[in-house]
Amino acid sequence: MMQGVLALVGGGEFEPEMAPVDRELLARLEGKPRVACLATAAGQDRDAAAGLADRGARHFRDLGVEAEPVPVVDRESAMDESLAARIRAANLVYLADGDAAYLHRTLRLTHAWDAIGDVVDTGGVVAGSGAGAMVFGERIPAAPRPLPWRKVFNIFPGAVIVPDYGAVSPFKMRLLRAVTLRRVTLLGIERHTALLNAEYRFNVVGAGGVTVWSRRRHERREAGNLILWP
């Protein structure tokens, strides 16, 4: 049973505008914050991934907490027990944006993924931004075409997570709803905004909003509001 917090971020990780959201995540921790920043989703470009993870660590250090990049960028490093131990030593794990399909392929059935699960299962916080959020849903589109859909970790059964929702055209969203045959719930999370799942409650934090689009409802909620889902 998940004892901690899972935060789905719409994008813009490590930018100054994310500081209020990240302070909220840090406030949810018990004990001294220890942040692990992973840019696994960007791992197809090792230099870019290293730079992104380093930027994340600097961002959290600027917030006054201990933070380090953890270089999990491929299957080999995801199976490295020493890197998994560094993830488990953290109480906030942050998965940066990139390629959701690559992130899922890389982390699936690995020591790193087990370690991430251990952090949230023992009361910590796991945050995923962009692609890092998408993999917690049931499926993601198999880019560049809308079909077929790729199954991912399915932490939120029946959900398709749509980051940077404010930048998605209404036409594209209607098309997305059409190709899913309305069988799923779209969770549209705007940039610099997070949907926090804690104690079976979904709460919006940040500058934007979260849109829930399902058979039952199509509604947008802003910071401080609870989300009814599914």
Image (cartoon, grey):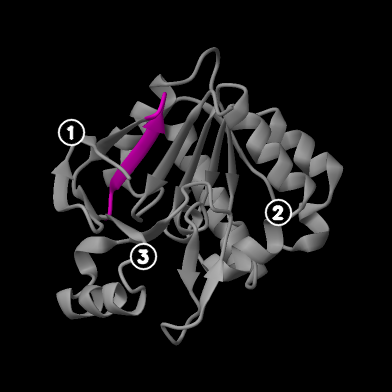
Which residue is label 1 attached to? 225
Residue ID at (63%, 72%): 45
Please name whichever residue, 26 or 119, is drawn nearer the observer in this view of the structure: 119
Pair 2/3: label in front: 3
Confirm whether residue 81 shows in the render: yes
- Magenta residues (range): 191-200
Disc 1 on helix, strand or loop?
loop
Q: Where the C terminus falls, by quadrant?
A: top left
Magenta portion: prevailing SS class: strand
> Residue, x 38% and y 58% (percent of image)?
161
Mark whose residue sits in front, 2 or 1: 1
Tag 2: residue type? Val
Q: Give the Cα distance between marks 2 and 1.
A: 35 Å
- 10 Å neighbourhood of mark 1: few (<14), some, or many (≥20)? some
Q: Which residue is mark 2?
A: 72
Q: Estimate the x, y position of residue 167 in percent, counting from the top left.
A: 22, 68
Q: Give the CA distance from mark 3 to mark 1.
A: 25 Å
- Pointers 2 and 1 in contact (C-beta within 8 Å): no
Foreground: disc 3 or disc 1: 3
Please state, as top left, top right, bottom left or bottom right, where the N terminus lies in the image: top right
As shown in the figure, which amino acid type bears the numbered disc 1? Asn
The reply to whether callout 3 and callout 1 are in contact (CB within 8 Å) is no
Label 2 vs label 3: CA separation?
34 Å
Instruction: Name the one closer to the observer, 71 or 208.
Output: 208
Q: Position of residue 34 (x, y in %)?
A: 58, 26
The reply to whether the magenta stretch includes residue 50 is no
Numbered circle sitting on residue 183: 3
- Mark count: 3
